[in-house]
DNA sequence: GTCTGTTGTGTAACATTGTTACGTAAGGGA
DNA sequence: TCCCTTACGTAACAATGTTACACAACAGAC
């Protein structure tokens, strides 16, 4: 059925157009501030046409978020690839994480700083969002443990991975929310991330006398609002 | 003018009633899900009566948040009081932080996980929100540095304080958003916090062979939604 | 004691936004 | 050629934040 294929192709193309327009507006002005009418107008459809592809606004947001979680996980995979030393890999993962999050702060906020609320419809059916990226981290931590790089009493890979995740998440999320308040005299994201993750890893190491990681390039502060 | 006093007192009492009702509803069901009509009904006023005391909904939220930031800062002050050893004080601060945040996750979300948006009206006029608690932490870090407890190359008190803040914030905020997703096999908040903050501090110390902190009582997982 | 102006309150209405009902047009399959 | 599914748009609805306006209460001036 070539015709059915074409129809499906057009259907998917429209879905992509909607998601792209929505993504752009969401990232720019925040999810709550964007109306369906606005999205529809941008792609030259009526508002209700969106409802053919998406059950409601929340469904649109969910599907977009799910796609972008995958992209985020891919970025982490890429950062970890071809790095033999697991400790070094931890650093690379952290760098990539901060990089992604602060390049698209709005997006990060959507992905990791917003409880999924009404997504309780059927999100547990699919792969839980964010689990991909977590697995990369967890595997690296397991390697560190297996290689005897961490102190002997540190055997809980999940706990350690969660602590590391929490640390980098804390840096970026705190900066996204509070980064505009000058009174805190914020250091650059790279400095804070190096201090937090660097010291954390150092505290985990069995042999802290090993050399530290080199400096990275600076990252700009997250943009406003 | 006793009458003017009474009027002012009544005015303040009404304001408090509004804020209390709003707080209760916000904490229970989230800020966006609560309507002004609902708040008004709970305190037996008309909806528009709220507008006499507050410019709009955002203003109401702002004022509530400002008050509660102060309460949070007080909790931190109390936790830090009468603890001579600055390193131990860091731990106490972290404990109090996690305790407060996970006891009132909704509230924490409101305070530290939501960009202030329209609060850009006149929030910078007043003391920036959250700065009180930060000062307690910063002062403690300064003491640690002055006492030579940290490694010699660590001299940037602001940077270190921000890294520590980011770490505990990361633990609680990650759990608030993701804590319900079982696939991550979350450890208890106390375990993650100890791993993250404990290892971070250990990584900062000039002498990591010093004794670790004792275990604390367990904290329940943050409640849903 | 009366008047006046300010302040608080409620009713009604408005604008916006997510959402649904319904009529219509298109187009593929029999 | 006919039917039926699908997509689309117009109009309308419900909920919510917000404003306009009229009225009542009441403190202060005279």
Image (spheres, coloured by chain):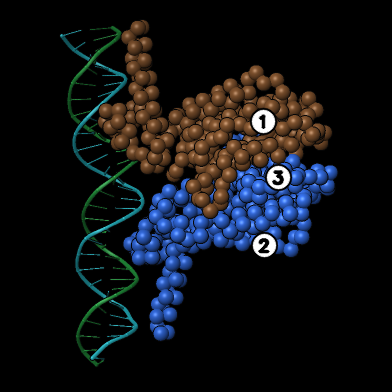
Chain colours: A brown, B blue, C green, D cyan
- Tell me which residue sits at (57%, 41%) in the image: A188
| B200 vs A126, nearest the viewer | B200
Mark 3 element type: loop
Q: CA distance from mark 1 to mark 2?
A: 40 Å
Name the residue tied to disc 2. B78
Name the residue tied to disc 3. B154
> Does A146 sit above or below residue B219?
above
Single out the mark in the foreground, 2 or 3: 3
- Residue A180 shown left or right of residue B86 in the figure: left
Q: Is residue A32 visible?
A: yes
- Residue A212 shown left or right of residue B175 in the figure: right
> Does B87 sit above or below residue D30?
above
Q: CA distance from mark 1 to mark 3?
A: 16 Å
- Tell me which residue sits at (58%, 61%) in the image: B71
Report which quarter residue B100 is drawn in. Answer: bottom right
> Does B133 sit above or below residue A70?
below
């Amino acid at each position: 059925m070539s015709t059915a294929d074409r129809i499906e192709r057009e259907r998917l193309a429209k879905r992509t157009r909607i998601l792209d327009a929505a993504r752009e507006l969401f990232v720019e002005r925040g999810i709550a501030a964007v109306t369906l009418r606005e999205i529809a107008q941008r792609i030259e459809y009526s508002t209700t046409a969106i409802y053919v592809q998406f059950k409601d606004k929340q469904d649109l947001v969910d599907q977009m978020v799910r796609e972008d979680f995958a992209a985020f996980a891919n970025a982490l995979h890429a950062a970890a690839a071809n790095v033999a030393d697991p400790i070094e890999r931890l650093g690379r993962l952290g760098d990539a994480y901060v990089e992604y999050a602060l390049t698209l702060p709005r997006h990060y906020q959507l992905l990791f700083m917003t409880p999924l609320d009404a997504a309780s419809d059927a999100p547990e059916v699919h792969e839980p969002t964010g689990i991909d990226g977590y697995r990369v981290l967890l595997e690296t931590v397991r390697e560190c443990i297996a290689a005897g790089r961490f102190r002997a009493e540190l055997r809980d890979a999940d706990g350690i991975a969660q602590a590391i995740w929490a640390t980098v998440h804390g840096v970026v999320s705190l900066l996204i929310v509070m980064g505009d308040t000058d009174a805190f005299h914020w250091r650059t994201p790279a400095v804070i991330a190096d201090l937090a993750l660097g010291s954390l890893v150092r505290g985990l190491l069995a042999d802290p006398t090993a050399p530290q990681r080199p400096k990275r390039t600076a990252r700009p502060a997250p943009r406003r609002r």
